[in-house]
Image (tube, coloured by chain):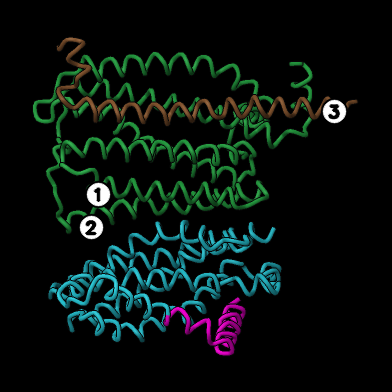
Chain colours: A green, B brown, C cyan
Amino acid sequence: MSFVPAPISRFFHRMASPPHFYCLTNKLLPWLTVIFILLLGYGLYAGLYLAPTDYQQGDSYRIIYVHVPAAWMSLFIYVVMATAGAIGLIWRIKLADIMVICSAPIGASFTFIALVTGSLWGKPMWGTWWVWDARLTSELILLFLYLGIISLYGAIEDKRSASRAVSILALVGVVNIPIIHYSVEWWNTLHQGPTVTKIDKPSIHIDMLIPLLVMAIAFKFYHLIALLQAAKVELLKREQNSQWVKTMLESET
Amino acid sequence: MNSFAESILMGGYAFYVWTAYGIAFVVLLINLVLPVLQRKQFLRELALKQKRTRQ
Amino acid sequence: MISAFFAIVRRDLILAVRLRAEAVNPVFFFILVVTLFPLGIGAETKLLQTMATGIIWVSALRAAMLSLDSLFRSDFDDGSLEQLLLSPHPLTILVFAKIIAHWLVTGLPLLIVAPLLAVFLGLPQQALGTLLITLVLVTPVLSLIGSIGVALTVGLRRGGMILSLLVLPLYVPVLIFASNAVAMAGNGYAVDAQINILIAILLLSVVLAPLPAAAALKMSMS
């Protein structure tokens, strides 16, 4: 890493050391939580109350404020996970391994939320709970990819090999996601089903857009908080025999 | 802008909207609470183990 | 390096000839599953005809899935996989050789029974050529992508279920393009676009799949 200036490289190495990371997380979490609650509060208030009613869909469109940010997050987290996986495979950084496996349940949750809210939105709009719509279908396949990662990690006993396995799988998945996405979209245009997709509107009113963006940012903060919380547990479990965990325990009791 | 009571009713779509928000809220909450509980329990176990080895 | 490549292909083919079940079982499975569909959904010719491509492709996918386990299993059990890892040649090439041999043993026989199944399900005559072409293009992709999943799960005692969960979502694009090509050909349309995409996917997976498969194999053996 000679092309990285020394102070930056030193910063990353310090960051990647488990005790330092643990301390920093403890300091960061309250701030992140405050920002998240403020954003979420405003996003919900603006989305559920301030934003005008849609003239076509009535108030059912308000599901957009969880559905769309959740769908964005589901893809975003997969990319984050694969990136962490690549870092973990190349530089053998323990923290990156932990980030990979802690990302998977959060990503799966967001995918699940996107599917369920999509279905709840679809019922009044399409008349059925499930339509083989291109986006819902790719989201479903994404959920399977997440579940595959979680179950592979659970099946391999040695957690260090499991992390490597999961990182490889995440990288394979991230190469495949665009191909899957476009193939499903292509398939969907051929099998014209019930395509009364009022959802696909090209323009969106600014009063409707702002809550959407606020919610998307709030979800990013949520992701950070949930990831750090999960990473703390995983870190403690893996480092339970190291000195810093012991001294921390002693100072607490 | 509509009144507060009206926006609770969601123009007849209350069931769909509130179920969607409710499920999302529960799932996200589980993801936050579970690691905290797990950490507390793990630390308790670890402290117990440490005490035992010291004796 | 090239001699090592061919040595592995030759060895695996000889082994397959000695243990014929490995090559024959997926074919039987393929025929059997396709036979079950008319029994399950009724023997209406019209209905079967519309479902034929879907039935054939999903069954082919399952047959390929089941045969995947034999890719590294016996070598893992008798320790020759460790020898492979210790060899001075790049593991990616050796893994690629094993995948090729596996495809020759389990993928190619599916081609031979495909016409039979087409007759079973009343697939239109003009779709048969496309079915064969897509099978030639897709079965290697199934072996290539599958090899990653097998390499990840070969060390596990009950890897079978997880293997399906890992691999099947990755099979979605080829399933879509291949079955669509066959259905379109049955209706008399040109299918150049689908064939071209399948060729692209094949080339892409030839280049990309052996790398993670080799990395995963190293992980499984450590």
Proximity of marks 1 and 2: CB atoms separated by less than 8 Å: yes
The tag earlier along the polypeptide, 1 or 2, is: 1
Per the model, the C-alpha gap separating discs 1 and 2 is 8 Å
Q: Which residue is mark 1?
A: A134
Mark 3, mark 1: which one is toward the viewer?
A: 3
Q: Which residue is mark 3?
A: B52
Q: Quadrant of the N terminus of chain C?
A: bottom right
The image shows residue C199, relative to residue A208, as above or below, that is: below
Give SS at disc 1.
helix
Q: Chain of mark 1?
A: A
- The percent position of residue C80, horizontal first and vertical second, equals 69, 74
Stretch of the chain drawn in magenta:
C1-28
Viewer-closest of C218 and B11: B11
Q: Which residue is mark 2?
A: A187
Do tags 1 and 2 sit on the same chain?
yes
Characterize the local packing of mark 2: few (<14), some (14-19) or many (20 or more) Cα atoms within 10 angstroms. Answer: some
- The percent position of residue A24, horizontal first and vertical second, equals 61, 21
Mark 3, mark 2: which one is toward the viewer?
A: 3
Name which residue lies at 78% across and 22% down.
A247
Q: Chain of mark 3?
A: B
